[in-house]
Amino acid sequence: MNSQLPISESEARRAVRNRDAAYDGRLFFAVVTTGVFCKPSCSSRAAKPENMRFYASAAVARDQGFRACKRCLPEKSAMDSNPVIPIARYIELHADQKLTLSDLSKLFDLSPAYLQKVFKQTMGMSPKAFQDGIRHHRFKAYLKSDASVTDAIFNAGFGSTSRAYENTANQLGMTPAEYKAGATDKGISYTCAKTTMGFLMLAASDKGVCFAMFGSSEKTLFSLLAEEFPSAQIVKAKKSEQINQWFRAIEQHLEAASPLPDIPLDLQGTAFQLRVWSFLQSIAVGDVLSYSDVASGIGQPKAVRAAATACGKNRIALLVPCHRVLRGDGGVGGYRWGVNLKRRLLKLEQEK
């Protein structure tokens, strides 16, 4: 067994036995009797367990004297062989056009049902939702530029103003016109102090907490807050404001893992992100799940990578507890505010 492989031997053998494509690209197995190495999903005849060797990369397998399988082509990027990737790239390049499922299926010679299924499994959303997401991000960029709201609507690919408002108002947390103005009518109050886990800034709109981030200083965190809500009416919270009570509750939680009160949130993201963040809030203190568990929990077990990406986009630490999600092999995995902080938070909660 290769000592650098970040999973157990039993997990590696199970992945190969099940021909699990989810491990392609991060696990390779070689057979000493044939001198060939493959990816887990290879359809070749099963080898005897005692003849198998496992590696974390194709390069290491080659260094050990094995040659690449001509059937599964293990050195070819899984992304390159995934039929969804060129479809996603096409949608991205033509997001301003009307793209139906029928159009895409004809273009890529796939049945509509299969294209919809495999795209959703890989990307965590339908082709239509993916296109809407691209339009939404472009729309935000146009609104931040000198373009008028109307120009932004049509440049982003929305066919009408009503469609733009229907698709973006909830995700922006305000109307497009308000966002264009830099959310000047959106009052945001914040508080910041050094906690046992480092500096924490908490900010809230009239709907609830919209920002909770760790950082190296108040200045750094304020820059991030201002970037997220450009030109908004951002003011430091008065001592009497509710947000200070929420902050003290979070401090107590960080010091002794005391229960957090029911703090309202103002979440803004794509429909898929909102589903992931909502599920994260159901994970109890002291419990941990894998990214695979999260994907299954929202009803899309194949969308593991998309679920992990949504966790990484979370901007409300602790209250949307993405730190309670680990890699499938039990490893800590990434964390927006650093893996060391993630380990400390997990230790605090699990020792309580």
Image (spheres, rainbow, N blue to C red):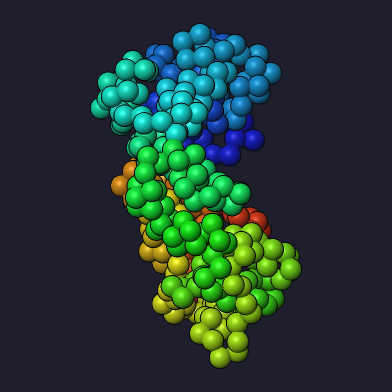
Q: Picture coordinates of residue 298 (x, y %)? A: 34, 50
In the displayed structure, does residue 158 sit left or right of residue 321?
A: left
- Residue under the point 40% across and 41% down: 158
Q: Picture coordinates of residue 18 (x, y %)? A: 37, 28
- Residue under the point 51% across and 35% down: 9
Q: Is residue 78 above or below residue 252?
A: above
Which quadrant of the rendered structure holds the N terminus?
top right
- Residue under the point 72% across and 64% down: 220
Residue at the far bottom in the pictured view = 240
Q: Picture coordinates of residue 159 (x, y %)? A: 37, 40
Closest to the observer: 129 or 298?
A: 129
Q: Is residue 190 above or below residue 168?
A: below
- Residue under the point 61% across and 61% down: 230
In the displayed structure, does residue 307 sit left or right of residue 201?
A: left
In the displayed structure, does residue 85 sit left or right of residue 54?
A: left
Q: Is residue 236 above or below residue 77?
A: below
Closest to the observer: 37 or 190?
A: 190
Classify residue 119 by image quadrant.
Answer: top left
Would you say residue 333 is visible in this rendering? Answer: no
Q: Picture coordinates of residue 287 (x, y %)? A: 44, 63
